Amino acid sequence: MNLNNKIALITGASKGIGRAISIKFAENGCDIIFFYKSNEKLANKVAKEVKAIGRKVLPIKLDVSNYIEVERAKLKIRKNFEHINILVNNAGILRDSLFEKMSQEQWDDVININLTGVFNCTRVFLEELIKSEEASIVNITSISGIYGNVGQTNYSASKSGIIGFTKALAKEVAGNSIRVNAIAPGFIETDIWNQLPEHIFQRVLKKIPLRKIGNPDHIANTALFLASKDAKYITGQVIKVDGGIGLSVL
Ligand SMILES: NC(=O)c1ccc[n+]([C@@H]2O[C@H](COP(=O)([O-])OP(=O)(O)OC[C@H]3O[C@@H](n4cnc5c(N)ncnc54)[C@H](OP(=O)(O)O)[C@@H]3O)[C@@H](O)[C@H]2O)c1
């Protein structure tokens, strides 16, 4: 699998899964543009790592939920890169709460960043993708968007929304040779889980048939496959990368 001379835009890549995807893509010959929200120090570290691999990199600090900021980023990108072949919509947050206690702010933050952020980035960059040959969009959803999860009505709704978005857009843009797929990670070891109490973590672990949580590289490998020519007949799919947790009904 290689992405030689491709250019990828990856959202939410200062750490975690987005960082792993950036490094993996760079190792496979791809130049990287990435968005992050606040952590400049970590973003610079990722940029250094990509440069050390020998690829071009452009980190941009913005909020994916703000359409105007994303549009402004496009102008900056155009000055540095001719086109974009791959878009990975990865930026996402948790604001967990039981529904009865969930505030409007917790609902809005999650929907605006996780779902409207995907709309914003795809809407702004679709034209660029149409111009490039054999483009690919990879959206990061979650098993929470497939099965639902207690305390995550906002998050599950946002991630189910991404699945519907992925399938509908796949049909709309197939004629432009753009493939649109999604990855549904299970429990992956990143900062997002710092908010998870230890006893819940232990309970979750027991439900995973492979008996371990995943790491960001597992998701990056799948993103690499979906973005590459090896997946050129795959579109509108949701691939679970979850250690088999979805099998644990019995
Ligand atoms: N980890 C898991 O177990 C898991 C499971 C299923 C799905 N996922 C999904 O995978 C994706 C990545 O998760 P992760 O675990 O890698 O999270 P993470 O370690 O918390 O990293 C999140 C990244 O998104 C960026 N970000 C957050 N809000 C943003 C915004 N408004 N605009 C632009 N960038 C923003 C952060 O930037 P700053 O740090 O600079 O703010 C950071 O780079 C998310 O969509 C998440 O829902 C994760």
Image (cartoon, rainbow, N blue to C red):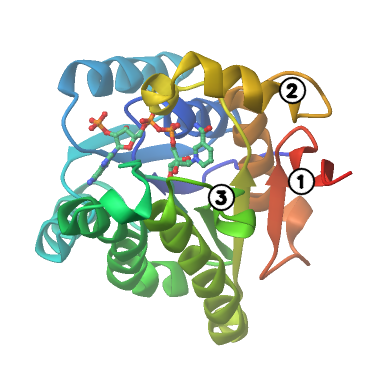
Q: Which residue: 64% across, 41% down?
A: 224
Q: What amino acid is at disc 3?
A: Ser
Q: Position of residue 66 (x, y in %)?
A: 14, 59
> 97 above or below 163?
above
State the mark number for residue 246.
1
Q: Quadrant of residue 138?
A: bottom right
Q: Indicate which label's residue lies in the foreground, 2 or 1.
A: 2
Q: What amino acid is at disc 1?
A: Gly
Task: Describe the element under mark 2 as helix, strand or loop.
Answer: helix
Left or right: where does residue 62 sit relative to residue 116? left
Q: Residues within 10 Å of mark 1 (few under 14, many from 20)?
A: some
State the mark number for residue 144.
3
Task: Describe the element under mark 1 as helix, strand or loop.
Answer: helix
Q: Indicate which label's residue lies in the foreground, 3 or 2.
A: 2
Outermost residue to the front: 100
Q: Residues within 10 Å of mark 3 (few under 14, many from 20)?
A: many
State the mark number for residue 201.
none
From the viewer's side, name the closer residue of 85 and 18. 18
Location of ligand 1 given as a quarter of the image: top left
Quadrant of the frame with the N terminus:
top right
Asked if the residue at tag 2 contacts the one at tag 3, i.e. Cβ–Cβ closer than 8 Å, the answer is: no
